[in-house]
Image (cartoon, grey):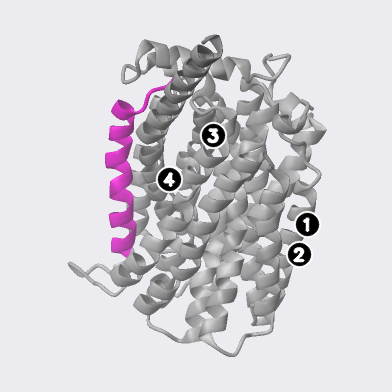
Amino acid sequence: MAAATSNLITSATGQFAEHTRHQVALRLLPFVFVLYVTNYLDRTSVAYAALGMSRDLGFSDRVFGLGAGVFFISYVALQIPGALLVERWSARRMISATMIAWGMLTSLTALVHTPGQLYLARFALGAAEAGFFPGVVVYLSHWFIREDRGKACSNFMAAIPLSFIIGSPLAGWILGRNWFELQGWRWLFVLEGAPAIVLGVAAFFLLTDWPRQAAWLAPEQREWIDQKLEEEKPAGDQSVSAWEAIRSPTIMLLSGLTFLQYFSGYAIFFWMPTMLKRQSGFSDARVGLIGAIPYMVLFVAMLFNGWHSDRSGERRWHAAVPLFISAIGLLALVARPPSMVLTMILFSMVAINTAYLPIFWAIPTEFLSASAAAGAIGAINAVGSVAGFAGPYAFGYLVTRTGSFAVGMAALAFSSVAAALLILQAPRSQRQGNQEP
């Protein structure tokens, strides 16, 4: 009888926990997912706008490489402050203000006429967006227990490929439209900036900073989440400054490999439409349609990778394998495949590079205390995001100097392999006996 009673209690407790976890995921993940789709549409709109701007304004590949990269100068500078504001001030207020600012600046990019104006617009946009990504990663750690964190990050970051699946054909269609004597690429900036403003206002009212503040949860649910998160805190939870986080050998390792991954990842994001256009000779609209295919593959790969990583409790190989696959695709593209079918298969392999992200960003929150994680995530993303400037610019420079994409793609393959090898040296998660650095 006692055993039966114990089993009933255990079953009821398990059902309660499962219901609470499901309720939190259903409340938060769809909304932050939509926010990140909007973020990436705004950030990468210049990749497709470049097709129209090069015709209308005469901008060269080097101008676009620098325009894509200058975004990250201001973006890098404000990473750590943005992450710490979410941890110590308010995620709701920070995310809301960030979105409204970047939406307005994206729309204003439609006024660009000169390279200098493009650089200024991208620099301002980088400053506006800086706190969003590290802020949301920290925010998710306030709500999701360790065994759910990989899935939560992958569901959030699946917005990256979906933004391209939606944005690629949409951008191609808008580029072919001239309304009120304004070129399509100008409308692209206006129409992709407006949703961020609306969603930024919505975020202020819909997000909740901490479980203890969630009126939409029952008191016992709030208590259960707080207790679970408290139990999972690493030993020695104490305030760690940004400088102390950066000086940690582990954080330096994670920062270095993030630089290498971002170097290849952002170059791929910004240059794939141009590479497809020049290789296929298709119209802008058709390039937009086929450009969505690699990101459909990435969308599935990212969700599966996060689910399988949580199920197995393994992080490092789940982060490394997508990078190895991407490197193989890049090297095969150097040989200029003879058909568009094979080309799209290889570009799909290349795009899988980004399936690394949700697994990687679950790692710091699993072995660092809360305050250390906030500073470390900002520091890692700041160092890594320098490559957001270096990658697109270096790729554009190599294309201009050599007249071919081959050297640039070989450099991206090398960067991906190096990042994969470094991630295998990262600490194991606590579920595998990990220790704080």
Residue 260 is labelled as: none
Q: Earlier in the sequence, mark 2 or mark 4?
A: 4
Location of mark 1 (residue) = 418
Residue lying farthest to the front in this orientation:
1
**Mark 3 / mark 1, whichever is N-terminal:** 3
- Nearer the observer, disc 4 or disc 3? 3
176 left or right of 329 in image: left
Q: CA distance from mark 1 to mark 2?
A: 6 Å
**Type of amino acid at the residue the image marks with label 2:** Phe
Task: Find disc 4 in the rendering and name its residue.
Answer: 36
State the separation of the CA atoms marked 1 and 4.
28 Å
Give the mark nearest the N terminus, 1 or 4. Answer: 4
- Report the residue marked by disc 3: 148
Q: Is residue 157 left or right of residue 186?
A: right
Quarter-of-image position of residue 240: top right
Residue 158 in percent (x, y) is at 47, 50
| Residue placed under numbered mark 2 in the picture | 414
The amino acid marked with disc number 1 is Ala
**Magenta region, residue range:** 186-210
Circles 1 and 2 in contact, beta carbons < 8 Å:
yes
